[in-house]
Image: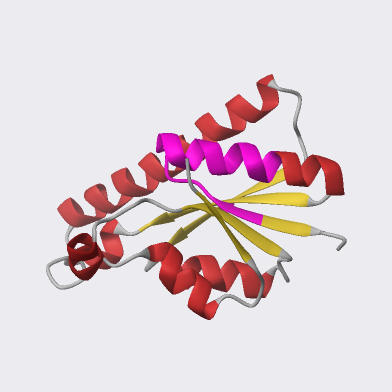
Amino acid sequence: MEYKNIICPVDGSDLGDKALEDAVYISKVSNAKLLLVHVVEKWYKAGDVATHSPEWETIHEGWRGEGEDLLNKTKDKLEKTGFKNYEMVLREGDAAYEIVGVAIERNADIIVMASHRYSPLGKVFYGSVIDKVTKKSPCPVLWVFR
């Protein structure tokens, strides 16, 4: 299969870094564009208590800044290795919904993402972003475990 667009969600975790390594490898062998996606969920999850006050705007800007910083650190890591065939995408909202949205918009061929191992009880309380992405994705999802 010929890949043109690969999506790799970036969350800053060690396991997420392993998924990134795999996504970079696939990108290199297929010459596909790697789309690094980070979703800022905090603002979305704070929707019930957030207001349009200056204080909340400052908090919101801080959360977006954290996401931008994470993407920039990832960019720096990739550029140190000489890899440059990537694009950064910052979104806000529900992580699974936004990842699938980018996949649809960019006609992604594959999503490469880390599968954090929650206990069955943890999945009940936290849900599983990778489960939701896999169920709604327009393309295959490669689960990375290590």
Identify the image quadrant of residue 7: bottom right
> Vertically, is 8 above or below 43?
above
Q: Is residue 72 visible?
A: yes
Identity of the residue drawn at 28% across and 53% down: 60
Q: Relative to residue 108, is residue 46 drawn left or right? A: left
User: Is residue 22 found inside the magenta-colored segment of the image?
Assistant: yes
Q: Relative to residue 142, is residue 30 drawn left or right? A: right
Identity of the residue drawn at 42% across and 69% down: 131
> Vertically, is 133 above or below 63?
below
Identify the image quadrant of residue 67: top left
Q: Of helix, strand and loop, which mostly describes the magenta segment? A: helix
> Split into 4 quadrants, where in the image is the N terminus?
bottom right
Q: Nearer the viewer, residue 103 or 70?
A: 103
Identity of the residue drawn at 85% across and 49% down: 30
User: Is residue 65 found inside the magenta-colored segment of the image?
Assistant: no
Identity of the residue drawn at 24% across and 57% down: 119
Q: Tell me, what colour scheme is on the image?
A: secondary structure
Which region of the structure is painted magenta? 7-24
- Location of residue 23 in the rendering, given as x and y in whole percent from the top left corner: 66, 45
Q: Nearer the viewer, residue 78 or 23?
A: 23
- Location of residue 138 in the rendering, given as x and y in whole percent from the top left corner: 64, 78
Q: Residue furthest top?
A: 80
> Vertically, is 4 above or below 133?
above
Q: Nearer the viewer, residue 140 or 91?
A: 140
Q: Residue furthest left?
A: 49
